[in-house]
Amino acid sequence: MFRSFFFLLFAIAPLFCAQESEELLVLLGNEKALFPAYIEEIEMVSSKFGESYAKQLKDVLKFDIGHNGMNKIATNQEEKDIQAALGTPKFNEAVNVKALQATGLSHLIRLQIEGSNLHAKIIEVSAATSRNVGPIECSGNLAQDRKKIHQLADTIHQVLFGKPGIASSKILFVSKRRLPSIRNEPQYASEVYEADYDGQNCRQLTHTNSLCATPLWIPKRSQSLLKTNEHGSSKFLYVSYELGQPKFYTLSLYGGSPKRVTTMRGNQLTPTISSDGSQLAFCSDITGTADLYLVQFESGIGAIGKPRQIFHARGTATGCPCFSPDGRKVAFVSNKDGCPRIYIMDIPKVGTKSADLKPILISKKCRNNTSPCWSPDGKKIAYSARNSGDREIWVYDIEKESEEQISKGEGSKESPSWAADNLHLVFHAYTTSGCDIYMINLNQPEPTKISSGTGDKLFAVWEPLDI
Amino acid sequence: MKQVQTVLLLLLILGCAGCTRSADDVWNDTKTASRHMGRGVTSLGGKRGTSRQVAQQGEFEGKERFSRKPKDFIPLDDVEELLIADAEAIPAPTESPGDEGSSIPGIEAFKDPALDPNIAAIFEHIHFPYNSSLIKGEDNLQVLQQIVFYLAKHPRMSVFIEGHCDKRGSAAYNFALGANRANTVRTALVREGASPDRLFTISYGKERLLFDEEGEEFHRLNRRGQFKIYEK
């Protein structure tokens, strides 16, 4: 009898196994060929600026072009070959295209400052075409001129690739500093900041003297109903611990008083706003467990009506919702099946039972998945996942139903946020030197650190296109 | 007899072969099974929360609290019923500290009991397992009991229960986990007899680590429920 039992066990065991146990071997598929670009030294003609200022401007443009997701800046060795092919560069002189083509260069950018005007010439080497851009008038104030250089970089991107660049966009993030300990217990305070996409021109937006978390841009479409606003208002939403329990507030980028979004009881956490600005989803523990809620939203008013529960799973931690671009679905994280994983779900109608909710699991390769962020084109969901060791940024392709790790390098990476071009992501990463904000794009897996200064920098979010 | 065994064996194999599933099916079954692991024979009784035997009178408190429709949110259609059946769910207090019209002030008015040598030993930290909001261990239960005992003697005292996480989970997810930890402590205190309207939760996630160092003991100490108190 026992023999038969064991025979039976061995006979049926393979039928219970998955088709194959897929070993998780991470191969980054995003190390793609980029177009080599070279930016010449700025030629100065009767310029009122010094050489060092010109170099600073060139460095800003070099960063922008080198991080646009399509170009790579020529290496030192390539530079030597290109310089040899160019001879002594002159802005208005013709280029020896054949010699340049032999170096493998794709794009040459020539710059000239005449007086205070910066002229740019874009040469597409393979097509042997050139186009002038500008001039832009520089002020000599680097903070102001950086913005103009970013605009120039975006114009160059549009000319070369037919799509708008992201160099003029901004990010919001939280900077957390450690205060003196009280009775050996560390104290912390954090505030919301705004910065250019490269981390420069940083400025503090909130002054709460408490903890702030997870800021969000409020899409411009939600602000169009405002009757008056002297600045044409760009607003953001953030979580503040001023009262103790975390609550949502909105504030203009140009100051003013914070405005509470909803009077709902309990903790309100990890908010997200739909791309048309009409819906706010968030996590709350009002029923005694961390569930998801949704409420109609308008920037000038805040929450409209009562928030309604859209997901409940008893005793589980559910949070980090994010909307699909059409606002009909949410992606979120829940540990309802054990460890935290990413699910997507249609937003349920009023009157739906929790038993009828059918969230679809999308993150199957790693055990520890959090912070989903839906790309503006709706085709991808980025999230943070840990396989072994550090957390990395992964992307789920909705059409292919496949997951791919896109980041590498030092640090545990969290809270990805897409740029409007569906190519770039910003996130924070914990390393041995603290927590900082990094930028990556799908074509360049090596993250670039963009934050600086003391304190941890967290929860970076990229400005949407229509702000 | 042997022939019968052989026939039964073949039938079983055929039956199982008929149930051959895709990797996705196996995965879905596996993840669902994880909910029942560690629950032993109780998992055979169906999903908890939909129906279960009430052990004591106090567990009916949930029903009383949910018998009124909540004023500030709309639950999913069956969540009220589920929460009534679920003695472990204690909804948020009727007041929100620091809000306009609330009789309870904001966090600024609350003090850290650790700073008062007379009560520091009462309001000790509650510690949690990794990625869990379960309260385990005699030490934790003893702390909960002494807090309930103290609150019974101080009926005008309100408590903020802070839920904290260690640094390994992601910051955003830890907000939800911290909320559940704070609520588990609150529920345990209420079940021991404390008034739910005096107990407020805060989730700090991993934003207020006690220790920034790596190491299991540091992680354990960071995964905590912590208290702040206010007495009118």
Image (cartoon, coloured by chain):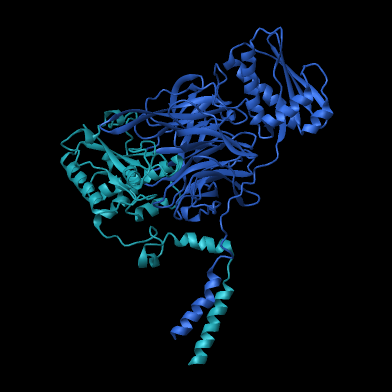
User: Which residue is at 60% across, 34% downward?
Assistant: A419
User: Which residue is at 66% across, 22% downward?
Assistant: A151
Letter of the blue chain? A
Is B101 or A128 nearer to us in this picture? A128
Res. B22 image quadrant: bottom right
For the C terminus of chain B, the image quarter is top left
The percent coordinates of residue A255 (x first, y second) are 48, 19
Q: Is residue B151 left or right of residue B128?
A: left
Q: Is residue A357 above or below residue A163?
A: below
Is B220 or B63 nearer to us in this picture? B220
Q: Is residue A72 left or right of residue A355?
A: right
Q: Is residue A131 above or below residue A115?
A: below
Is B3 or A276 nearer to us in this picture? B3
Q: Is residue A23 above or below residue A99?
A: below
The percent coordinates of residue A15 (x first, y second) are 55, 71
Q: Is residue B157 left or right of residue A281?
A: left
Residue A212 visible in this rendered orientation of the protein: yes
Res. A426 image quadrant: top right
* Number of marks present in the image shown: 0
The percent coordinates of residue A153 (x first, y second) are 68, 24
Q: Is residue A114 left or right of residue A246?
A: right
Res. A44 image quadrant: top right
Q: Colour of chain B?
A: cyan
Residue A128 visible in this rendered orientation of the protein: no
The percent coordinates of residue B12 (x first, y second) are 53, 80
